[in-house]
Amino acid sequence: MQVGLSVIFQNPDETIPDQQVYQQDLSLALQAEGLGFDSVWSVEHHFTDYTMCPDVLQFLTYMAGATKKIKLGSMVCVLPWHDPLRVAEQISMLDNLSGGRFILGLGRGTGKVEFDGFRTEMDTARLRFKESTEMVLNALENGYAEYHGELIEQPRVDIRPRPLKSMRGRVYAAAVSPESAKIMAELGVGILIVPQKPWKAVRQELQDYRDVYRQANDAEPPSPLVAGWTFVDENPDKAEEKAREYIGGYWDTIIKHYEFDKPHLKDTKGYEAHGTMYDRLKAPGGMEMMTDFFVNLQIWGSPQQVFDKIMKLQDETHMDGYMGVFSFAGMPISEADKSMKLFAREVMPELQKLAPVQERLGIPA
């Protein structure tokens, strides 16, 4: 199994200067290669304290210069907020600078505050994401960009520096709705999962994705990647206490940033599946139940408990890559550093020893 580290630069309620948050999370990211992680990742978000990485490709370019071998992943680059031509150029440049170490994660975005800030209509996001993804992936394969769609009209131009090598097999997308998963399958893109739904629903959506992928591509889909909010301690009681404090605190920031406690997504084209969150939160005891549900989906406990939970993730999703987020919700950097190093010492080597998921679970390759 491939094991990665993700940093998200979160500063809830701005309790410390933003620069200090960057110094702290960078101190984790810069240890990743030496600790033996296979990859380092970050996210893209704008305008709030939820996460403060407005340019994930810029961050990964910095990490490319600070490292030698570790892979570099975007979790994710949100295409509807960008000119896809510029994204294709930035990806090609990063891949050239890093020697082909880039893993491309894509998404369409959900935060109203971000769409409003970029003056982009959320109602168009699904189609804009589909067209942008097609244009970017074709540009990276062909070495030139050209697209004629409903929303995007791009005359032919060359991508320079020319793409170093094919992106096939290293492109993933975060898909929350079944409709988005279908789009990704048709485009031949892998799935990036953040645990946030009942596993029964995830299993069904993944099966639907795999069926569409096989039909559209005449091949088996790549194994998913899973990202999880992670806390490890030798004392399982302390691990649970801290998980409920900090992972629960992270859930609070999700509600705030995405405004899930407001009904706007219920009436936004393409986001109806997200809008159901409002109904669940507004039900009696809904916030408490949803917090517990989210916390219990994430990865925390003693080293053995964390290993067992990641194995359960693999059983549920057939994933073959796990990316841990260790610093979030105002957690002291000393706690995050200790948790990350314990994970790297006690859990990660056992995960990296595992046979490929297809072999371990006896599934088609």
Image (cartoon, rainbow, N blue to C red):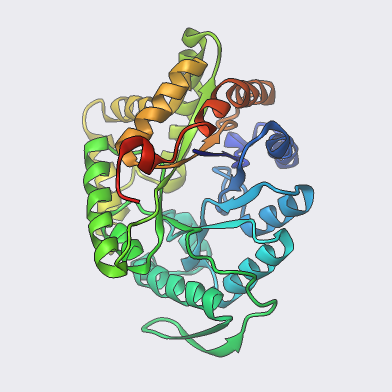
Residue 22 position (above or below residue 57): above
Question: Between 182 and 69, which is closer to the camera in this rendering?
Answer: 69
Q: Which corner quadrant of the image does residue 244 belong to?
A: top left
Name of the residue lying farthest toward the right: 66
Residue shown at 68%/37% (left/top)?
A: 32
Residue 344 position by quadrant: top right
Q: Where 232 sits versus 283, above or below? A: above
Q: What's the residue at 37%, 33% (across, down)?
A: 313
Query: Measuring 31% from the left and 54% from the top, which residue is drawn there?
Result: 264
Query: Left of 357 or right of it: where is 236?
Result: right
Q: Position of residue 345 (x, y in %)?
A: 63, 22
Does 198 sit left or right of 1 as displayed? Answer: left
Q: Position of residue 14 (x, y in %)?
A: 64, 36
330 vs 215, nearest the viewer: 215
Residue 268 appears anywhere in the view: no
Left or right: 128 with respect to 323?
A: left
- The image quadrant that residue 251 belongs to is top left
Q: Residue at x 59, y 46 (%)?
A: 41
Tell me if I can see residue 82 in this picture: yes
